[in-house]
Image (spheres, helix red, strand yellow):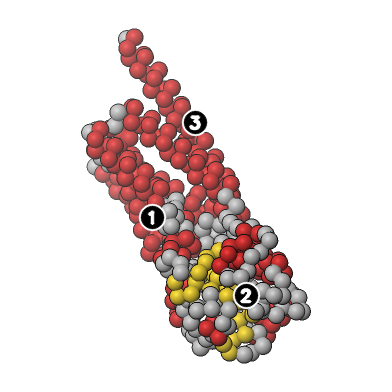
Amino acid sequence: MQTKLASGIVVALVIALFYIVSFPLNTWLSATMPRHQIIQLPAMIFLGVLLAMPLHRLQVKDTAWGIALLIYVMASLVFWMLPHSIDYAFVETWFNRLMHVNMVTVGLLITAVMRGIRFEVKILFIGMVASMLMATGVALRSFNILLCSSYSIDQQRETGMYVILIGVAVYILTVVTFGRMLRANRLRQTQ
Amino acid sequence: MSAFTIFSYTLADAGPVPRPMPVFNLVAQDSSSFTISDLHRFTLVNFVYLNCPDVCHKVNNKIEEIYHEFDSTIVPSKLGFLTISFDLANDDIRKLNKYREYFGEDLRGWTFALPHGLSEVQFDKILKEIGIWAHRVPDRGIINHSIYMFLVDEHQTIVKTLDPARLSNAEIINQISQCIPGVAHAN
């Protein structure tokens, strides 16, 4: 009974936060590129992760399905980083909300797959995300031409710097996770 | 790759060059009415709006340098320059004329103009046909837009698209010169 209540509270919280980020705060969050790409987009992924928390049975153990879903996740992330998509999301509010829904789904799927998939796939996925973020960040920082018509070149460079920092953080997370898993495996083998 | 940015997508969506330049009515800085088909010469067309915080003025400064690179045997007889404003709501002939004065007193062959008799919706449609992305940001007076320049020949055909963000003045002059018969520029 208590678990159901907790799950209900989490779901209600996610819906409330989704509404706040996607509706009343949307104009403010879309006003600059760093807010849109560094706050709004990851906030939606976080909401997806939060939504998956009480859904303990939601996990993908099958490697083939897991990899297929992670490819979908990567494709979604790449799609919403394209300058054309960012511009269209700025111009059309419905398209921006499509991004929100897609990112919540991404958060939900990442949690489901990470719960059940084998260690090697987890490390590969986190490593790929880190590389993609760092490469995107470097591109945004180094390009001397405006990529998104909706934002300025200064905002483009600022976003690039934050994306690099997030990429480095995710890379450190990859190394730490790899080390921990390796140690846990060794301990298991020695026992 | 053409879909990577909204600028490149809109340009690619307009089709490959050579393609016809849409003909629409314009009013020049001296209040005279004309269309591109009245010019009967090669014309380098670009689009700006006067409230632009920076990029439009940078592009026009670049065009000013290019304009002065061509001698009087080429401009205005063989090549003209046409700067058209996007901003139907805020720009007018008086402002455009004053703005033109910043680039010098003797600007023969460089016309600044406003579209005439067109609604914003109609003009946006024409811009898309040309290959220009323009979006008016509500309540902020800002127009997000492409900065491509188009070389239009005497038959109103777009023969060249030039990107001032990627090309140097020398490259632009060279590409324009190659298109105009009898013009061989030393650059």
Q: Which mark is residue A100?
A: 1
- Residue linked to disc 2: B79
- The residue lying at 68 percent from left, 66 percent from top is B66
Q: Nearer the viewer, residue B160 or A116?
A: B160
Residue A18, x across and y down, in percent: 39, 55
Q: Amino acid at mark 2?
A: Leu
- Residue linked to disc 3: A172
Judge depth for marks 3 and 2 and give the one in front: 2
First in sequence: mark 3 or mark 1? Answer: 1
Question: In which quadrant is the C terminus of chain A drawn?
Answer: top left
Q: CA distance from mark 3 to mark 1?
A: 27 Å
- The chain under label 1 reads A
Q: Nearer the viewer, residue A4 or A145?
A: A145
SS for tag 1?
Answer: helix
- The residue lying at 41 percent from left, 67 percent from top is B15
Q: Amino acid at mark 3?
A: Ile
Q: Is residue B56 visible?
A: no
For the residues beneath circles 3 and 2, the answer to whether they share a chain is no
Residue B167, x across and y down, in percent: 60, 58
Q: Which mark is residue B167?
A: none
Q: CA distance from mark 3 to mark 2?
A: 58 Å
- The chain under label 3 reads A
**Eyeballing the image, is B3 above or below B91?**
above
